[in-house]
Every structure is written in structure tokens, then in C-alpha cells.
Image (spheres, grey):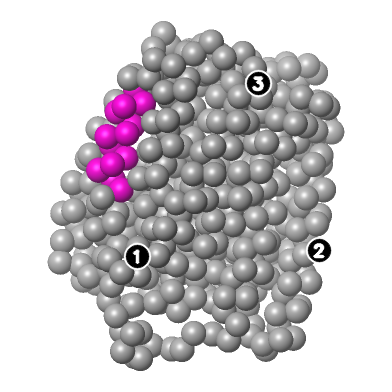
Amino acid sequence: MKHRLPLISGALFLCVFLSIFNEVLLSPFYPQFFRKVFGVTDLAYTGYYIFVCRLTVVLSAPVWGVLSRRFEVKHLLFAGQLGAAFMTALMGTSTSVEQFLIYTILLLLCKSSYLLVYPLIIQLSGEEKRAAIAGTYQAVFHSAIIIATIIGAFMVNIDTPLIIFYGIAAADILQLAICAYILRGVSTQQAGGQESRGENQPVAPNQMGYIIAIGVVILTFQLANNLVRPYFTEYVTAEPLNVDILTSSLLFLIPSVMAIAALPYIRQACRPERLQTIYLGSLSLLIVSLGIQGLSSNLPLLILARIVYGFFLAVTQAALELQIFNQSTAKHLHFNYSLAISFANIGHLGAPLLASWLVNTHSLASPFIAATIICCLNLLFSRLTHKGYLLRTGVRV
């Protein structure tokens, strides 16, 4: 299988790309999209819609994680891809916002199977390539955001924005065919099966306790960094910045571009013994950049803050994910990652609700201030969790 590994990884990263592309396509422009297509003018509906989406993923992600311990991961992925293609096509037929929401929920129930892809790449690639895979994942993830946002900026301005979902459905079918071909003859239960016969290392002491502890760190991290997304384009197109929608989409994309630029640094710096130090240092710079974005009315300063924010957002994200992988045995890799994703999506879940409340009761800048405060709390909690875990177990992370 080793000679086919680049092709296998490429096919799986294609799944990651299309999954993020579909999710992000209209997300920066939901207020404009719902207003134009369905006549929804209440900004709070954007928060409600994102809340329901995140709740769906929170509930469904652990189910796929449990199923991965009983069934071939690739078979679960194929089922999810087929269901996602069908539901995405149905989204293009929506005639009301309620119908669009129902199809979205059904889509996410299927699309949650894609959360198995990242740990599957890690599983197939081996421990020595984890930092490289984590960096590549961040690059693919943010490349999808860049392309989706650019296309979304144009799609929201055409007469029939829903037509894009037919194209996405066709892409889902294409990736299903590619994955089925590339993964033929590849066992995705090999590592788990070996562990069940005792051939791999034992589960680390207090592993579940560590996963839960770092899960809380992930929750607050995702809460803070998703808090600033739903109304960002509204924020920069309003006074005093007052940029046009194309410029707002470019500003939205800056962190994603910088995440790709961070790939070489992640590959070089994110070694197991340095992960906690890297996380704390990078998070400190995130805190500064978030505060500047919320307080500055100067466009060049905002751009600089977005550049710093994007680079270190990718680094902190990679450091968190690698800590999960490094503390997970092969048998529990998919389950632990799905559990971590559930914590992340609880943060995603609360972010649009908190953002909606802050925007409606304070200002469009208030999500940045709240995110800065939450990241400060995350920094403190992460230090306490790390020290407490080392004292209890002696495990280096």
C-alpha cells in the first residue's frame, strides 16, 4: 500500500476540501443570502441557522465515531458521500427557508462521516508524518475556504444562488467514485484489529480524562474563533470601515491565505515535545490580533491584524489536533477525534448564538472583544490543564 499512499492521501484530502468548500461557500454571506433568496431580513436568523447546523454535527459526530469501531471506515465514508450528494442536490430545490434548513440538517447527518477522514489519513500515514499531515490539512482546509469564499461572493449576487448546490452534488458523486477506486483493497481497520490482538501499545494512563480536559480547551478555542465569523462581512462593510462586499470577502480570506503560508512552520515546529509551548505562544498573539480587529477603525492596521491572526490560528489549531493524535492509540484514534470534534462543535454551536446576541445588543465589533476575553480564559485554562495532567500522570504532551 505504501506506493499508493500519496494517491490515497490525495483522494482523502479531496474529501476534506469538498466538505469544507460546501460548508463555507455561503457562510460569510448568510445574512445577504437569506435576505435575497428567502426574504429573511432578521440578522438573528443567521445565528439560529448556524446553531442548528452545529447542533446536528455535535449529535451526529460521536455516532460516526462509534460506528468506526465496528465497521470499515471507508464503507462509512462511502455511505456518507452518497447521502451528502443527494441532500446537497435537494438543497438546490428549496422554495422556503424552512425547507432549506431541513435539507441542511439531513446533509450534515451524512456529511459528519467526513470527520473520519482526517484521522484516517493520520492512521494510514504513520506517526512520523503527523506534523506534515497536520500542516497539509490546514493548507487544504483554508484553501477550500479561500476558493469557496471567492465563489460565494459572486454566487450571492447572481439571480439564482441555489443553482450552485447542483454543482456541489456532482462533485460529491465524483469524489465518491475517486475514493472507491483509490481505496479498493485498502483495509481501514488494520490498526484497530492489531490492537485488539494486543500487538500495539496499551492505552495511555487517564487517556479519557486527558481527552476531556483538552476537549474543554478545544471548546473555548473554537467558541472564540468562530464568534468573529458570522458577522465579519457585515462588520467591515458598515461604518467606519465601509468597504464593499468584494473587499470584505478578501479581508475575510486573509487568515486562510496565511494558514497556507504557515504550512512550512507547522511541519518544522510542531514536534510532540514543543506542542504546548507553541500553542501558548501562538494563542497569545491571537489574543492581541483579535483585540486590534475589534478596536481598530484603520484599514491597514486591520489587515495587519488579520495577517497575524490567520498565521497563528493555523498553528494553534494544528498544535491542538496533534496533541489529540499523540495521546490516542490507533484503535481509539477515530473515536477520540470524533469526541474532540464534538467539543469543537459545542463551541461552534454557542458561537453564532453569542454573536447574534452581542450584535443585537451591543455592536458589530463586540464579537471581537468577547473573543479576546474568551481566548484569555482559554490561555489560563490550557496552562492549568497541562500542568495538572503532568502532575497526575507524568505524561509529556
Q: Would you call the spot at circle 2 few (<14 residues within 10 Å), some (14-19), or many (20 or more)?
A: few
Mark 1 vs mark 2, CA separation in Å: 34 Å
Viewport quadrant of the C terminus: bottom right
- Residue 166 picture location, percent across and down: 29, 25
- Residue 319 picture location, percent across and down: 60, 64
Question: Measured along the vertical axis of the image, is residue 123 above or below residue 297?
Answer: below
Residue on which disc 1 sits? 68
Q: Residue at x 49, y 68 (%)?
A: 336
Q: Is residue 361 left or right of residue 21?
A: right
Residue on which disc 2 sits? 380
- Residue 252 picture location, percent across and down: 61, 32
Which residue extends farthest top?
A: 159
Q: Residue at x 48, y 64 (%)?
A: 337
Viewport quadrant of the N terminus: bottom left
Q: Is residue 320 left or right of residue 167?
A: right
Residue 82 counted in the magenta span: yes
Pick the front one: 191 or 107: 107
Could you tell me the amino acid type at mark 1? Ser
Residue on which disc 3 sits? 43
Residue interval drawn in magenta: 80-92
Q: Which is in the foreground here, disc 2 or disc 3?
A: 3
Could you tell me the amino acid type at mark 2? Leu
- Examine the rendering and report whether any part of residue 324 can be seen: yes
The secondary element bearing badge 3 is classed as: loop
Mark 2 vs mark 3, CA separation in Å: 33 Å
- Examine the rendering and report whether any part of residue 304 can be seen: no
The secondary element bearing badge 1 is classed as: loop
The tag earlier along the polypeptide, 3 or 1, is: 3
Residue 334 counted in the magenta span: no
The tag earlier along the polypeptide, 1 or 2, is: 1
The quadrant in which residue 28 appears is: top right
